[in-house]
Image: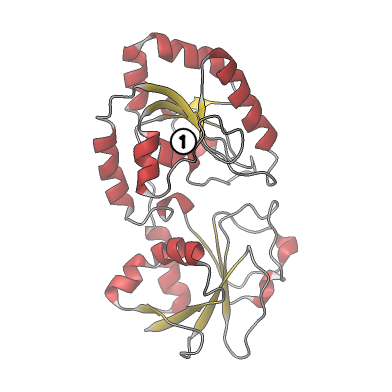
Amino acid sequence: MIRFAYMEEFDTEFIRWTGNLFRRFLQEGSVAVVRQNEAPDFIIASVWRAHDFPKDIPVVLISNENWDVFKPHHDLSRYHAVFGILPPPLQLGNVRHFIPYPFESVYYDCSVDELYGLRAEFLKAPREKFCCFVTSNKYFGEMKKTREEVFHRIHGWKAVDSAGLELNNVGYLAPRGFEYLHWIAQYRYMICLENSKTPGYITEKAFQSWIAGTIPIYDGGSLGKLNSEAFINASSDYMRELQDLESSRLLYTQRQNVELYREKVSLEPFEARFREVFRL
């Protein structure tokens, strides 16, 4: 058994979603999470927070961001392993072990298969509302301005409900967790551009909209991983496409039923590489 402790024991949100990375190993008993004073074999650190390196305990760094947008606090060669959604550039350090993972598969506290099962139920929702938009990012990513421009353009044609910290026009914040998926499922469309168009960069944004049965209005750095018929490309003539879908229920339903990913989202490649690196 490998014993992991967290550098930031107070960061409950980081511990929550990274725990989903280890779900299979925790269930089979090959991994345990302990406190720092309980002799861990490794310490897990977040890219978001500065930290020290404990004496004689290897550190594993986990990032759920674009390395260009949020750089690590230390040279990556100092870590036993680095987990990320895309490989870090060489100038950040010579990584000993890099293990990629799909962030969209761990954002919610259930398995990927369970999320796909939920989608079947969400598709039955009546879709009485037009479009939603949720962003609370004030600072990071070159797509921030583009995302807001898309919101303003669509909102100028037909009212869009914005329920994040930025551009809020509904007077409340969208719920979190599974309730967020239920909230999204009220809408036919969701504006959900990534923070960055860095090649290979993709998060939960389009996936959670699609799981809720809502067509994503999307742009990012991994469009090639997605079926173009499953979303509205915000870097193309999206207004024309949106208006066509709104005018034809049949066309909308056909688009709604297309698989989002060309290959199903899976944690299995991460789990296989994790077993190899940590010798499980």
| In-image side of 93 versus 208 (left or right) | right
Q: Is residue 148 visible?
A: yes
Picture quadrant of residue 257: top left
Answer above or below: position of 181 versus 43. above
The residue carrying mark 1 is: 226
| In-image side of 146 versus 61 (left or right) | right
Number of numbered tags placed on the structure image: 1
Q: Position of residue 111 (x, y in %)?
A: 32, 55
Answer above or below: position of 180 versus 239. below
> Residue, x 71% and y 71% (percent of image)?
74
Residue farthest to the right? Answer: 91
Element type at mark 1: loop
Q: Is residue 191 visible?
A: no
Visual colour scheme: secondary structure
Q: Residues within 10 Å of mark 1 (few under 14, many from 20)?
A: some
For the N terminus, the quadrant is bottom left
Residue farthest to the front? Answer: 171
Q: Nearer the viewer, residue 156 or 141?
A: 156
> Residue, x 42% and y 56% (percent of image)?
106
Picture quadrant of residue 19: bottom left
Hey, what amino acid is under mark 1? Leu
> Residue, x 58% and y 46% (percent of image)?
201
Answer above or below: position of 45 versus 88. below
Q: Position of residue 232 (x, y in %)?
A: 49, 25
Q: Nearer the viewer, residue 244 or 191?
A: 191
Q: Position of residue 266 (x, y in %)?
A: 38, 52
> Residue, x 53% and y 67% (percent of image)?
11
Q: Nearer the viewer, residue 104 or 94?
A: 104
For the C terminus, the quadrant is bottom left
Answer above or below: position of 266 versus 96. above
